[in-house]
Amino acid sequence: MEIDVSQARVSDEEIFTGHEGGKLSVAATRPITQARDLSVAYTPGVAKVSRAIAEDAALAKRYTWADRLVAVVSDGTAVLGLGDIGASASLPVMEGKSVLFKTFAGLDSIPLVLDTTDVDEIVETLVRLRPSFGAVNLEDVSAPRCFELEDKLKQALDCPVMHDDQHGTAIVVLAALRGANMVLDRAVADQRVVISGAGAAGVACARILQAAGIGDVTMLDSKGIIHAGRDGLNPIKEQLAGTTNAAGLRGGLADALAGADVFIGLSSSIIDEQLLATMADDSIVFALSNPDPEVHPDVAARYASIVATGRSDFPNQINNVLAFPGVFRGALDAGARAITENMKLAAADAIASVAADKLAADHIVPSPLDPQVAVEVANAVAKAAASDGVTS
């Protein structure tokens, strides 16, 4: 299914009307139309089910929705391109995420916005709520706290945990890069990739690209190229300095882009189009900052063979909805206790495979509305989970 980009532009009135009263409701899976139904669904019948679960906790997977429920969790500190706007203001975004889970993966989810930015308090809250859900989708948590939070939750919870701003973005970027290189008849591993932005998404993209075999990744933050020995690096950037920048580059974006094959923009910085002219022939530009890309796609197309953005009103939309519904569906289908690196790589391969039959310079990933994407991703992730031995 293709998106008509002319239909993607909406008015403010349509936006606010579409959010009025929220975007979610709870629907009963069993009708209650007579006293007998009430006796089964509630008292006295429900007591038998509760007693059974009290005797054997594993029965909760069969007789409650918790095992198939995703908690969509945010503290509102890094919401879209809006920054730290707080828990309440983040709730419309989390509701929207739940709508996407249901629409694309058939999964129920509950938005949980927490009025604390303390990592340990968030962990403690979710540990206490663990009987109520089967997986955690972290969303819009600021870096570098998001790395600590995800790591601590993975240790504390016996269920899939994924920070979508990190790994959902990384999965789709890798899928798009595979598609772009197939169009250009090049090997992904041979590319020299420059990533502008060392926040949650940038770090995850660097890691998944390296896991996919790309050995030459250069990263930049607001102070320039991240390299070994640079002062003021936090622990995450220190680690990246030791694994990226194979050429030992110093300086800024101009130094990094000269001769590069791929540019991935994950920051709010604006790029001088002349820098794109210094990249290698048949270059690839992913300008993913939202709502305003680092460079307008029409401008980037003057220099690059393939251009993608994060927006729905241009071709090649790199959108997390291509990844997270299927990733969580596959993890829950498999009874996975965690989401592994191989599961993420499998998801990227599955996304790329859906687009393979119709690959073109303006179609390197499937449409976010393609219903086949979540199915293929879920199947691939479930198989990878079983292969990695993280299933129950």
Image (spheres, rainbow, N blue to C red):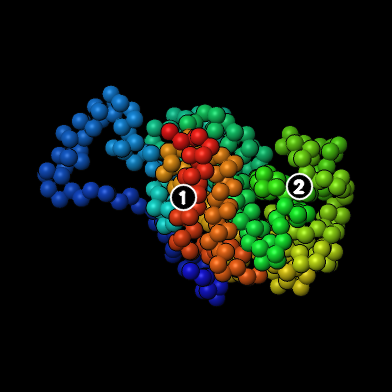
Q: Quick one: 374 or 273, which is closer to the camera?
A: 374
Q: Quick one: 176 or 26, which is closer to the camera?
A: 176
Q: CA distance from mark 2 to mark 1?
A: 29 Å
Q: Residue furthest top?
A: 55
**Residue at horizontal 70%, vertical 47%?**
213
**Residue at horizontal 57%, vertical 31%?**
152
Left or right side of 1 for 319? right
| Residue under pointer 1 | 379
Residue 223: x %, y % from top left? 82, 47
Q: Quick one: 193 or 9, which is closer to the camera?
A: 193
**Residue at horizontal 87%, vertical 54%?**
255
Type of amino acid under label 2: Gly
Q: Tag 2: Cα neighbours inside 10 Å, few (<14), some, or many (≥20)?
A: some
Does residue 20 show up?
A: yes
**Residue at horizontal 46%, vertical 60%?**
372
- Vertical side of 111 occupied by 318: above or below: below
Type of amino acid under label 1: Asn
Does residue 112 show up?
A: no
Residue 357: x %, y % from top left? 55, 67
| Residue under pointer 2 | 215
Quarter of the image where one finds residue 144: top right
- Vertical side of 139 occupied by 388: above or below: above
Q: Secondary structure at mark 2?
A: loop
Left or right side of 3 for 20? left
- Vertical side of 315 occupied by 385: above or below: above
Q: Secondary structure at mark 1?
A: helix
Residue 328: x %, y % from top left? 47, 46
Left or right side of 151 for 130? left
- In the picture, the quarter occupied by the C terminus is top left
Q: Tag 1: Cα neighbours inside 10 Å, few (<14), some, or many (≥20)?
A: many
